[in-house]
Amino acid sequence: MNPPPLADNSLQCDVSRKFVRVLKRRDNGFIEFEFSIGWPELAVELMLPQAAFEAFCQAHRVQPVSNPIDDRATTIL
């Protein structure tokens, strides 16, 4: 038996919204971060050198999301 479809639209995803949460800045110059499309709660973890990270953020026009563990982490745009 299939459940009935959801009545509300709370599960809609706006794929034009993109998010970055910086997790760690390594001593070797790499940035560990989460990248999300649509929902900031659903993310993939990535790691890029500083210059590539900055280019990635500009190319995707990301919105920075604060890190709940360390609110001092910021995104360089």
Image (spheres, rainbow, N blue to C red):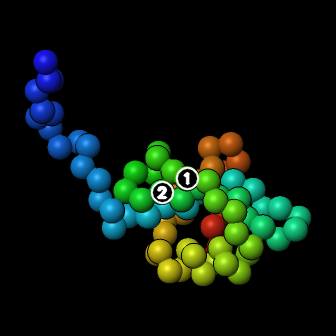
Task: Look at the image and tell me whether residue 12 can be seen.
Answer: yes
- The residue drawn where x is 44% and y is 64% is 18
- Mark 1 lies on residue: 44
Quarter where residue 73 is shown: bottom right
Quarter where residue 74 is shown: bottom right
Quarter where residue 55 is shown: bottom right
| Label 1 SS | strand
39, above or below 27, in the image = above
- The residue drawn where x is 63% and y is 50% is 67
The image shows residue 47 at horizontal and vertical percentages of 69, 63
5, above or below 55, in the image = above
Q: Earlier in the sequence, mark 2 or mark 1?
A: 2
Of badges 2 and 1, the one in the foreground is: 1
- The residue drawn where x is 67% and y is 78% is 52
Mark 1 residue type: Val
What whole-number distance in Å separates the C-alpha atoms at marks 2 and 1? 7 Å
In the displayed structure, does residue 2 sit left or right of residue 47? left
The image shows residue 71 at horizontal and vertical percentages of 66, 51
72, above or below 42, in the image = below
In the displayed structure, does residue 2 sit left or right of residue 64? left
The image shows residue 27 at horizontal and vertical percentages of 89, 64
| Label 2 SS | strand
Q: Residue furthest front?
A: 1
- Mark 2 lies on residue: 36
The residue lying toward the viewer, choosing from 37 and 1, is 1
Mark 2 residue type: Ser
The residue lying toward the viewer, choosing from 71 and 58, is 58
The residue lying toward the viewer, choosing from 74 and 3, is 3
